[in-house]
Image (tube, rainbow, N blue to C red):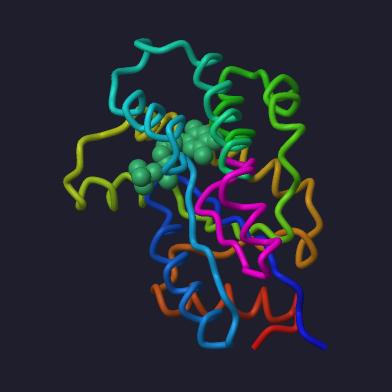
Amino acid sequence: MSIPPIFIALEGLDGAGTTTQGNRLRHWLLALGRTVLLTREPSDGPVGALIRRILKGQPGEFDPSALALLFAADRLDHLASEIRPSLAAGQDVISDRYVLSSLSYQSLGGNLDWVRILNQRAPAADFTLFLDVPPQTCIQRLASRGNDRELFERLDTLDEVRRLYLDLVGEMRPGQDVALIDGTLPVEQVTEAIRQALGDRFGLG
Ligand code: TYD
């Protein structure tokens, strides 16, 4: 029997490798004969573009609660314009970041319950891959890319975000809803661990 379209979320700290692994996962799914939408949040829609501009600013320049609302609005627009139509057309969807990003980054001030409410209308992904990389490694990777530093790309912030992520992952069912992947391994081995997790869960491969 054919395997129905799968909605996969890739999560991790800035510099954890979600973009690289999203591309590699897409190629694997295509090689298995599936059709795939690889997409990301902040999305490429109008709210996502606004968020990307804000992220280039300095801490304190934009109200964190207003930013949480924008991320949630971007997500609902992304679901309506890209994610749901693609799944309905039989495509797998890989989203580079999804609800878990908001539940960790936007709850930095301690308002997790409120952030959950904002995201209530966004259904859970079928499976979440959390690429776990220590913040020190993430900061080194980001520095070697030489891009300007964005709002959350600081060691103390990422430390706290990782703790929040790990708490949330700990509330999910391992192997069923989520896989925690060691993102410090060489790229090929991370890809292999992702294939293994999806293979076991959905019978792919
Ligand atoms: P990122 O995936 O790092 O984008 P890029 O690779 O294009 O820089 O995402 C940008 C930042 O947005 C990152 O620091 C995480 C943050 N973010 C949130 O705080 N909440 C969210 O809901 C999402 C989707 C991202």
Of the four image quadrants, the one with ligand 1 is top left
Q: Image point 76% across, 59% down: which residue?
A: 177
Q: Image point 31% across, 32% down: which residue?
A: 150
Q: Image point 32% across, 44% down: which residue?
A: 139
In the drawing, does residue 203 fall left or right of residue 70? right
The question of residue 93 being in magenta is answered with yes
What is the count of numbered marks? 0
Percent from the top left, x then y, of residue 51?
41, 28
Tell me if I can see residue 158 in this picture: no
Q: Image point 69% across, 67% down: which residue?
A: 6
Percent from the top left, x then y, of residue 191?
49, 75
Q: Find the magenta span and give its range.
A: 80-101
Percent from the top left, x then y, of residue 102?
59, 34
Judging depth in this view, the residue of 204 and 93 nearest the camera is: 93
The question of residue 83 being in magenta is answered with yes
Q: Residue furthest left?
A: 146
Tell me if I can see residue 30 in this picture: yes
Q: On the rendered image, what quadrant is the C terminus found in?
A: bottom right
In the drawing, does residue 164 fall left or right of residue 74? right
Q: On the rendered image, what quadrant is the N terminus found in?
A: bottom right
In the displayed structure, 202 sits above or below 77; it is below
Judging depth in this view, the residue of 1 and 186 nearest the camera is: 1
Judging depth in this view, the residue of 133 and 112 nearest the camera is: 112
Place residue 34 in its image quadrant: bottom right
